[in-house]
Image (tube, coloured by chain):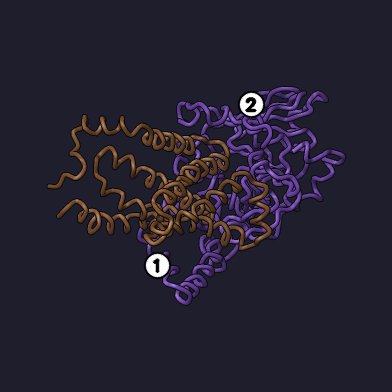
Amino acid sequence: MTRVQVITRIVKPALFLLCLLPLVLLLGSDLGANPIQTLERGTGDWALRMLFITLAVTPLQRLSGWNELVRLRRMLGLYAFFYALVHVGIYAILDQGLSLSAIVEDIAKRPYITVGFAVFVSLVPLAVTSTNAMMKRLGGRRWKRLHRIVYASAIGGVLHFLWLVKADLREPLIYLAVLLLLFALRLKPAHWQRLRINLGFQGAGATE
Amino acid sequence: MLIKKPQPIRPSEITAESVYRDRRRLLLGAGLALAGAGLSGDGLAAGFLSGLFGGDEKDKAKEAMPDGLGKYYGSPKNAHSTSEEPSEYEDVTSYNNFYELGIGKSDPAANAELLVTDPWSVRVEGECEKPGNYALEDFLKGITLEERIYRHRCVEAWSAVIPWIGFSLAEVLKRYQPTSKAKYVEFVTLYDPERLPMQRRQGILDWPYVEGLRIDEAMNPLATLAVGMYNDPLPNQNGAPLRLVLPWKYGFKSIKSIVAIRFLEKQPINTWNALQPNEYGFYANVNPAVDHPRWSQARERRLGEWSKRDTLPFNGYAEQVAGLYRGMDLAKFF
């Protein structure tokens, strides 16, 4: 099998199921005394993590020289949107009981919800333009520029988390550190080319 | 310590306490099972999976749940007890903020055995005639325990109804004869970094945990010192062996595992106020009109319930305590 085939026929389907696992496990777990809070936190955590995993694809590609990895990126990105959608859905439906006035007031008055809502809104155009047809319509350059929004989404996601915790900043700060690392990995492609050769990865296009 | 003996009742008449407390859940479970079967596979699947994967802390709490007649069964009911249904014991004992035992909500129950509550003593200090270091049995000597079913409202906007077993704080404070200089009362939690790993770490809270009241607040009949709940001694995660219960204030004021009581001239700085003064004040009276800077305080969610409810001023105890704050700007003195 070529590397492309491994990615598309084995890795992608397996990853599809793997990405669903956190939600399944969350729903099946003991949700505790405050189940809505548990669900909100769980889906929020995974929305952010999926976003980070999506952002890790390109650096991983550059480091390994495996350009085929990009084929996984759309699915991972859409999973980030999926978890964000479930997270917002739980908030709007279960937490706020679909009370529009309560939701609007939250968005207006609570900075962490203002940011959270903005992050969700920012992911919508990214999800909508994720299809092949859309990529063709926009053209490579415009699509790439539009999808740079994801950097702002990731920063917003971390801010949302930072602003909602009561005292213990450890977890959100860990996310911040990871985010900074992911951004650093995107700088200076030339450096990473050199690193790749030094680490002994095969050049791009090599087949077994 | 006076413990009122239970009245003679035929054993056959008694519902097992576990079943009595479980009845809402049993009914709810039956209802959910029907709804789940009717609506979607999710209800049944979730139940099945949760059986498969098990629940950690809630199950632990369930196992620890006392059945049969508790030690404090038969305690007289306090006049201000609410007629609302108490929250589920498993919820109240598996969802706690007790950072000394861990930051997560289920950590205190998981790490409960770290707290050693025997022997225990209470230091009484400051502006009073009878300071001293009192063993807990002596501190509690001659107290009449009552069942006080109070609402409990956390600053995080969740709440519960808890049948505390306790007594009036005023009753005990008066024994130590606070002088006229005693304008405030300060309470201190256990400091035991050897046994409590969180207290060895920096950057969480300033240990030991400290709380305080104005002397008139402390003397209000609603202010309670609790030694038990649900007819049994306090579980460690709920602040054993002795804690404060201030039902009209946010829960962080109801300090747990008290080792010292001090009568002070000046207002003490309570721990959460020291950590974030623009978010947590000294008075911390439940007030739906004054939001936390980062979230609304207008509504709350009862543990175990799905929908939110409106928060009441002073957590519904305005009649008993509003007078303490007459003329005070409650948005300023939050």
Q: Residue sitting at 45 percent across and 38 percent down?
A: A175
Q: Residue sitting at 45 percent across and 73 percent down?
A: B40
Q: Tell which tag, 1 or 2, sits nearer the viewer.
A: 1
* Residue B39: x %, y % from top left: 48, 75
* Residue B41: x %, y % from top left: 42, 71
* Residue B3: x %, y % from top left: 63, 47
**What subunit carries mark 2?**
B
* Residue A37: x %, y % from top left: 53, 52
**What subunit carries mark 1?**
B
Compared to residue A70, the image places residue B141 above or below, namely above
Neighbor class of circle 1 (other Cα within 10 Å; few <14, some 14-19, many 20+) is: some
- Most foreground residue, B181 or A180: A180
Q: Colour of chain B?
A: purple
**Chain letter, colour brown:** A
Circle 1 SS class: helix
Q: Label 2, on which residue? A: B123
User: Quick check: can you spot residue B147?
Assistant: no
Q: Label 1 is placed on what type of residue?
A: Ala
Neighbor class of circle 2 (other Cα within 10 Å; few <14, some 14-19, many 20+) is: some
Tell me which label, 1 or 2, sits earlier in the chain: 1
Q: Are marks 1 and 2 on the same chain?
A: yes
- Most foreground residue, B316 or A152: A152
Q: Label 1, on which residue? A: B45
- Most foreground residue, A177 or A153: A153
Q: Label 2 is placed on what type of residue?
A: Arg
